[in-house]
Image: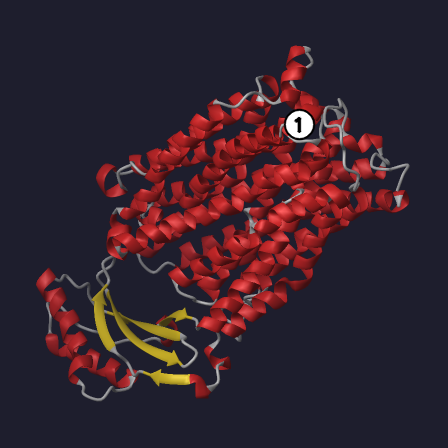
Amino acid sequence: MKSNEDKPSSIYQVIGASSVGTLIEWYDFYIFGSLATLISKQFFPEEQGTAALLSTLAIFAAGFIVRPFGALVFGRLGDLLGRKFTFLLTLVLMGGSTFAIGLVPGYKTIGVAAPLIVLFLRLVQGLALGGEYGGAATYVAEHAPAKRRGYFTSWIQTTATLGLFLSLGVILFTRNQLGIDQFNDWGWRVPFWVSILLVIVSIYIRMKMSESPLFAKLKKEGKTSKNPLKESFSHKANLKMVLLALFGAVMGQGVIWYTGQFYAQSFIENTCKVDFEQSRTIILWAIVLGTPFFILFGALSDRIGRKWIMMLGMLLGILSYRSIYQKFIDYTNPALKSKELVLEESGVRSVMAIPDTKSNQKLFIVSKKDTSYSDGAVFKYTTTDTLYLAEPLNLSADKSAQVVFACTTLGADSGSLPTYYTMKSQATEALQNAKVDTLNLLVNYQGEKTAIGVEKKVGKDTFWTMIFLVFIQIVYVTMVYGPIAAFLVELFPTRIRYTSMSLPYHVGNGVFGGLVPFLSTLIIEYTKSPAMPNGSPLAGLWYPIGIASVCLVIGALYLTNHIDEDVMDDENEYIHN
Amino acid sequence: MNTIRRALGIIWILLGPAAAIFMFVQAADKISASNQRIEQAVDELARSTAEAAKLNIQLQWGIIIGIFLPIAFGLIIFGYYSLKGEYDREIE
């Protein structure tokens, strides 16, 4: 290993080649998730049962089944054939499938073939991701000098977060350049196409790299594993390390990682109702400020050990998540804003009736109003009432426009802004007077069918405070995630390292982490009551808190804080302590 | 510390099946709720939507249980190893 210490430039080439490729793989994986709503409309229309089913498969199977399966398939290849070849292969698969998703015609053009192709490509993405991380982390660690392994592998650890950053950035940039309509129509494909350029550059760099010195030495001596899967999971000494890695470190890391970034973004956008652009900008800033801490904690782990940094990250998450998310709610709750802050409160700006395209037996009456605050916040409210019609509306385009016009003009003609209820009754009257076709209205406004949509733009101070709150969570992420590559590499012997570390990583990250949104929503459902029809918004945090708590107990009691300096050993590190 | 590690092994052994049972109960609960929605559907459109939703829920939970069962089994093995002192250490 001393030869590596003598050549600091070569290790940076190794880090560069590995990190850029891994970053691109994460970017590829996340753009699908970030554009899930748009992709659903293009490929998985809800009204088409089969297509909606394929959507579920694409979301669930890619994360939960295919990623761990990819860890096994490519981990085995990496331990048999070498790290370099395997993570080149995963990069080609990921880049190719991502680019291809951007080319697939929509459901309207080629029918059910569209979701089938996208499902296949998404599964290839999951498979490739499952094989990539273990290879890159192993490759860097096996090049790194013993006492700086945490520092050098922490560069690989930045890639997942930076991949998310890049995907959000490219999406926002493309959306701003093209405009919302063009982006929704075809512009969403651009981030997928961008991937191919990044992948070509990364493949070129990786092709120039040599094989890991430790693996090359094993291969030269004929000591590589003949059956890495069997050695990893049927030999007790290794299996118990795989289980310890999963339950004592990666499981907790997975939920802290997902909560700090994905759940935070989803909570700010869907629960706090902060608008699309601002909710993403908050995450982007927090990532920019938080990313250097991956390196900091990676380097620190070389001095004080990996274990307690990871455990502290989990403990802080467990203790502070509920208060952080309560702050998100408070900062965006209009009821908690002082009345003195209100600059302008508009009445109902417009009312418009939109015929329901699915059943033709409903009309949606939509009204909008805004409240502006002196701190720069603007809260927009959209109320949608559903009118149930006795008979289906068979409107021509002209007639449909007449109905919309009849209602829309009410707001414009009214002079001083009337109340919402006045306008609603005027809209009803206009519809009855319009006598369009068989327009026989029940005029059956049911309170429970009224939906109120809110889109909030927070003021400057609140914006930065929210960035700080997400930043804190990203610091927790960097504590649990920064040192974990070095920790996993040191836990397993070289001959089966790729296989052994990839599986717990992808089960912990993909399954336990990936289930955060699903299980959190499930828990919130249990808190729904007549008094709280939407449930307790903070209840969903019990899932990451619970998993991180179990992981903290296991990790604190069972893991060792010892740094294994010789990763060339044939046995796992725990045995020596 | 080794005594605590071994004793906690029992907890991990019990936690595995408990988590699996919890998942099964949740799945059954959600699928039964989706059956109710099909029965309550007022028209053909609502019925076909509810049926598609049921299939989706079955698929989601099928995948989750399918991937979770081996993990729960892994937790039992982890607990067993703990109980048997496989994670004992001479140096604390």
- The percent coordinates of residue A157 (x first, y second) are 58, 42
For mark 1, what is the residue? A6
Can residue A395 be seen? yes
Element on which disc 1 rests = helix
Q: Please give the name of the residue rendered at 23% of the width and 43% of the height, measured from the top-left corner.
A: A108
- The percent coordinates of residue B36 (x first, y second) are 46, 56
In which quadrant of the rendered view does residue B7 lie?
Answer: top right
Circle 1: is it few (<14), some (14-19), or many (20+) Cα within 10 Å? Answer: few
Foreground pick, A432 / A194: A194
Residue type indicated by callout 1: Asp
Q: Please give the name of the residue rendered at 44% of the width and 47% of the height, measured from the top-left corner.
A: A166
Q: Is residue A226 left or right of residue A531?
A: right
- Residue farthest along the left direction in this orientation: A398
Q: Is residue A375 left or right of residue A115?
A: right
Q: Is residue A513 above or below residue A123?
A: below
- The percent coordinates of residue A26 (x first, y second) are 48, 40
Foreground pick, A524 / A96: A96
Q: Please give the name of the residue rendered at 29% of the width and 36% of the height, measured from the top-left corner.
A: A103
In which quadrant of the rendered view does residue A230 lie?
Answer: top right
